[in-house]
Amino acid sequence: MKLVVGLGNPGPRYADTRHNVGVRVIERFARDHGLSLDGRRFDSRFAAGAVTLGVARSEVALLVPETFMNRSGGPVAEAVAELAIEDVARDLLVVFDDVDLPFGRLRLRPSGGAGGHRGLGDIIERLARNDFARVRFGVGRPATEQDTADYVLEPFTDAERECLPERIERAARAVEAALASGVTAAMNEFNRDPDATEPSAEPRP
């Protein structure tokens, strides 16, 4: 079984904030694959079922911890222990916000440190390992001297909200690609800047 985790804070107060974009990616993935996140397990919203990944059907579990962000590790560790997660390095994928990436950019990685993200850091601490895949969704940094912790707890700007659904949909496709083909293969497609113009082909003589 594959386990995909979307990080955020619980409750309507935080639902539309930058810090909860990982949750919104998981919600989009669930909707695309006919899964309902109405279940409750591991102190989290939970869904599980067979999902078509490429040409195969695979069992996938979706987890949205209902703890606050910096306590995400407990639900994830519990789910890893109780579900049939054979290989954490291969079968766990975590989706979360990243202030070090421009808005809407994705960065897939097969492993690594927390990079200052408290939710990811707590997962690494509770699992006592960091060799699991992650999808970072760029939310950018504040243009002023605003504290980063305050910035991520604010909603997206009006301009960002206009293109946010498209970027969330792209992130959900990146999750699907990582599950189907492995994160290394998905990196080649989704780590590129979606706004970059592809170079035109040279005309043939």
Image (cartoon, rainbow, N blue to C red):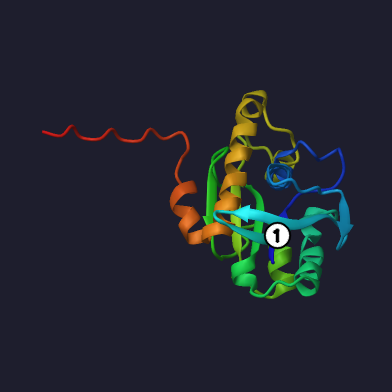
Above or below 175: residue 102: above
Q: Amino acid at mark 1?
A: Val
From the image, which quarter does the N terminus lie in? Answer: bottom right
Nearer to us in this view, 45 or 123: 45
At which x and y percent is residue 8?
76, 49
From the image, which quarter does the C terminus lie in? Answer: top left
Nearer to us in this view, 179 or 51: 51
Q: How many marks?
A: 1
At which x and y percent is residue 164?
63, 32
Left or right? Give the position of 199 relative to 184.
Answer: left
The residue to which callout 1 is attached is 60
Q: Which residue, as the protein is rendered here, is positioned at the far left?
A: 205
Nearer to us in this view, 93 or 72: 93
**Could one spot residue 130 in this view of the protein?**
no
Q: Residue at x 68, y 46 (%)?
A: 29
**Could one spot residue 43 in this view of the protein?**
yes
Instruction: Name which quarter of the figure residue 125 lies in.
Output: bottom right
Q: Residues within 10 Å of mark 1 (few under 14, many from 20)?
A: some
Element under label 1? strand
At which x and y percent is residue 138?
58, 43
Nearer to us in this view, 191 or 84: 84
At which x and y percent is residue 40?
89, 56
Q: Residue at x 59, y 69 (%)?
A: 90
Above or below 22: residue 123: below
Left or right? Give the position of 101 relative to 91.
Answer: left
